[in-house]
Amino acid sequence: MKHKKLNKKMIPGLIVWLILAVISIVCYLFLRNQTIFSRTGRLVLAAGMAVVVTIMLILSILVHKKGVVFMNVVLSLFVAGSCLLVPNLEKRERNIFTEPAQTDVRNISFYVLNNSYRASHAELFSTLFPSESFTDYAGATFIVQDELNQNDQSVAISQIESELGKEVKKLHKDTVYDAIEAFYNGEGDVLVLNESFIPAATQVSKWADFASETIVVKTITVGEETVDLSPSEEEMDSFLVYIAGGDTRSSSLSLYGRTDVDMIMAVNPGDHQILLVSIPRDFYIANPALNNGMDKLTHLGNDGINNTIAGINQLFSINIENYLVTNFAHFVMLVDAIGGIDIENPYEFSTVGSNGAAVTVDGVQYGGEYVFPAGMIHLDGNMALSYARERYSLSDGDYGRNQHQGIAMQGILTKIQQLSANGDYLTVINALNEHFLTNINIDNLYNLYKSSSDAGSEWNFVKYHLGGEGTYDGTASMGFGNPLYVCKPFDSQVQFVNEQIELVMNGEVIESQPLPDNALTTFVEN
């Protein structure tokens, strides 16, 4: 009889303990999915709940007092209350990130998790020893957030894509919190984040050691110091740039491939003067990559931008080191990004019914059929592409197209100068970074326009489009037994360009002159 009475005394405690156990299990299953807990935190939570529930089971069996029942009730309420409280705590943590202040200079850094963290979470990573060289991440997945600081993040991404020479793979997350969470979960390789977010991130317990668990492989500085914007003497020195337009049907920018636009740009910042020399793409020129065999200029790009630059340097006896490379699709997007361009068109012509009126890139048509009247006209991106590409309706074919390309480039440079003078930093930087591949520091170009004492004054342009003898001949790239249309340069024009470039590089102001032997230029339809 005594044994039965003892069991009856146990029943209330065991019932309440059972409620505690069920609530604890349900609560754990709920809480383990809350991102507020790290992996270690979830294990500690499970172990702690198991210990408490076990202790209360032992007390419920051995101690038949109301106090034990009361403790089970209190713990049940506490565990249930925690289930309701944790989501609110997580919501608060998610809201700790706010739009950073627009300081003069902002640093966007590219983070990877270090080998120590990877070793303790080996199941998440394909390699335990991350590279500290940024160029090794060209094929990596970059985690970006779509919540805050979008302009700066976009500028930084565009700049690294220019440096890597390709568009990087991006994993988009809705918030800064989600981006960091995905980073720690191994969903991507590189986290892109404004450094000002890090102090807030370390307030989240599971990311408290962010600084010691990560490596910064790259930092892009966005903005400009306002203390002193005056260019240095070195920045005011004259410089040369090769400008190329890729003849590609892909929207991806590349430093390899045939060129449809070939220009030499000599810039004299001190006197606000730019010399633009347009070279026919069929120029007959030595190809350094093919033992200096004679070739069409456009073919040199198949061995890379540096091969084209080497061939041009060799022909004109100059030393170009810098380049700006775009293509059909990005040319259109560039012009639209800066709000279109205004040009002085020397004569009326039309692209209606022309084979060169439009080009299809990755299934999207760019360009179109337009009539371009003589005089000052405004061009949007598609109009500018048709203007710069058309040759079939022109009496001098590719030579006339070269002239139009120089006019369009002047329109772009003039518009960038106007935007820079107005302090429209983001428009200029975003447009240049997103639509050119370059080895030039775009910030330096912007400061060059913006920082001089007469930043608002217009730049003086001197433009030449070279001619030559239009004929057919063999090429090193396609075989000398297979004649192709080429333009054989005039030595007089090559020498003239060399002299004009030398004057600009020496800081002298030049005046537009008649191009030697231009009347001897011959054109054969091709």
Image (cartoon, grey):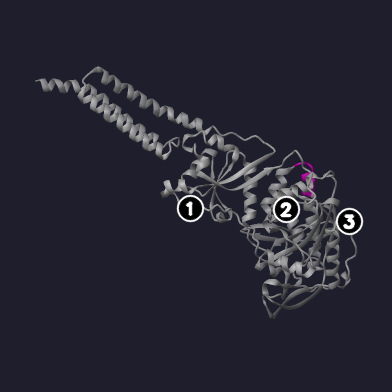
Of residue 262 and residue 342, the one placed in the foreground of this image is 262
Q: Is residue 413 above or below residue 277?
A: above
Amino acid carrying mark 1 in the image: Phe
Q: Nearer the viewer, mark 3 or mark 1?
A: 1
The secondary structure making up most of the magenta span is helix
- Image quarter of residue 315: bottom right
Count of numbered circles in the view: 3
Q: How dense is the environment of label 1, judged by Cα within 10 Å: few (below 14), some, or many (20 and up)?
A: few
- Left/right placement of residue 261 relative to residue 47 reads right
Cβ–Cβ below 8 Å for labels 2 and 3? no
Quadrant of the drawing holding the C terminus: bottom right
Amino acid carrying mark 2 in the image: Gly
Residue sitting at 67 percent across and 74 percent down? 290
Q: Which mark is residue 509?
A: 3
Segment colored magenta: 415-423
Q: Is residue 484 above or below residue 383?
A: below
Determine which residue is flagged by label 2.
Answer: 381
**Lower sequence index among marks 3 and 1:** 1
**Lower sequence index among marks 1 and 2:** 1
Q: How dense is the environment of label 3, judged by Cα within 10 Å: few (below 14), some, or many (20 and up)?
A: some
Say if residue 175 shows up in the picture.
Answer: no
Q: Is residue 227 magenta?
A: no
Between the C-alphas of marks 2 and 3, the distance is 32 Å
Q: Is residue 192 above or below residue 167?
A: above
**Lower sequence index among marks 2 and 3:** 2
Residue sitting at 81 percent across and 62 percent down? 277
Q: Is residue 182 above or below residue 367?
A: above
Q: How dense is the environment of label 2, judged by Cα within 10 Å: few (below 14), some, or many (20 and up)?
A: many
Q: Which mark is residue 129?
A: 1
Quadrant of the drawing holding the N terminus: top left
Amino acid carrying mark 3 in the image: Val
Q: Nearer the viewer, mark 2 or mark 3?
A: 3
